[in-house]
Image: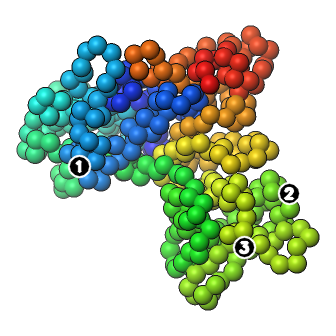
Amino acid sequence: MAEQRISELRVENFRSLRQVTLPLGPVNVLIGPNGAGKTNVLEVFRFLSDIVHSDLRPALDERGGFERLVFRGGDAHPDRIVIGIKGSWSPASQEHSDEYRLVIHGMPLARDEHFQFANQRHRLRTITIEDEVATAQVADSGEIAEEIGIQALSSGLSTLPRLRSSGFSLGPVQVAALLGSFRIFDVDVAQAIMPARVPRSGAESIAHNAANLAGFLLWLREHDADAWNHLQADAVDVLPQLEALDFDYPSGAAHTVVVVLRERGLREPTPLLDASYGTIRLLGLLAMLYDPDPPALTCVEEIDHGLHPQALELLVERVREASDKTQFIIATHSPGLADRLKPEEIVVCERADDGSSLIPAISTAKVEQIVEASEGMPLGELWFSGALGGDL
């Protein structure tokens, strides 16, 4: 199976994203002021994920419909929203980029879709959906292989993967699996400190809000000693008084578990309930980064929130290591975090006078030129000084 990656996102008229083409690598850190559109980039992927799970109409209705979602700046009223992604998610995508494109028309409400992917024989196939017809073609011959009916506002992302016909299900299954597994990770400190169920047999994954933090860490200790030892070493390295992580079982070893901290100089372990906000967030983020089976795409807002600056160096390194398994899109305001990034990892975001987002505001090549001209000044300092744009 080809590595699942998205190499490019293209958006027109989705909230503040009037016309955005965003190249994506393994680690993508969006940096810019409030209102620049960072969250809207994440919302594009959440919208696509909701389409996979519930279909187009419910995903639109949840956001107030087309008129609430379409770009509202400038003089002209846009009549369509366009979302397109390129990357690799089919088994034979080494020779050709896989593609998915969704066009939502406003008046009257309608949608068009286009899938492009390579099959096991490395033949490029396309599926086009217009009105109530889905057409499968062999791209290099132009011949129509098959046509089927589809409801007018049903999305191929949600409908086609359920079909038995491989001519229609193969490519959509793969892109739907990629987009449907999308996760915005945000540690809910109030949930993370609560007792979690003791994990049963089978794999355990960290919840999107770290609500099962204790259960996941216990599972990791019992099933992946190498990852557990590295995670614990990271926590000890960043938290000066910490000697070890341990567990307690408030309702019996077969039922619930909580995390406790064994700290230098204290007679008794400290329940996570009594730990600092930053400590809890750090453990949640480390759990996410050491998750052995993450989704293909992970988004994190304000990853540095509540963390001591000394944790940022380690956090960036662990994000890079984890990006072998999951692609990251991270939003931040932190110059301290940006200081530790490479030019190809930073995405400067700005907002134009008409309310549209400029993402990226400058290219990676331009960032590299500015860094070179500054004789290696850290990226956070360059951004804070205004040299990279995206004013605070």
Q: Is residue 16 visible?
A: yes
Residues 99 and 249: in front is 249
Question: Quick check: 329 left or right of 112?
Answer: right
Image coordinates for residue 127, horizontal then vertical, percent: 21, 36
Q: Is residue 374 above or below residue 164?
A: above
Residues 164 and 85: in front is 85
SS state under label 2? loop
Identify the image quadrant of residue 374.
Answer: top right
Question: Quick check: 229 left or right of 223?
Answer: right
Residue bearing the label numbered 3: 271
Q: Residue at x 20, y 50 (%)?
A: 159
Q: Residue at x 23, y 45 (%)?
A: 61
SS state under label 1? helix
Question: Alpha-carbon distance for marks 3 and 1?
Answer: 42 Å
The tag earlier along the polypeptide, 2 or 1, is 1
Q: Are marks 2 and 1 in contact (CB under 8 Å)?
A: no
Q: Residue at x 69, y 41 (%)?
A: 316
Residue bearing the label numbered 1: 58
Q: Residues within 10 Å of mark 1 (few under 14, many from 20)?
A: some
Question: Alpha-carbon distance for marks 2 and 1?
Answer: 48 Å
Residue bearing the label numbered 2: 240
Q: Is residue 34 above or below residue 352?
A: below
Question: Alpha-carbon distance for marks 3 and 2?
Answer: 17 Å
Quadrant for the C terminus, please.
top right
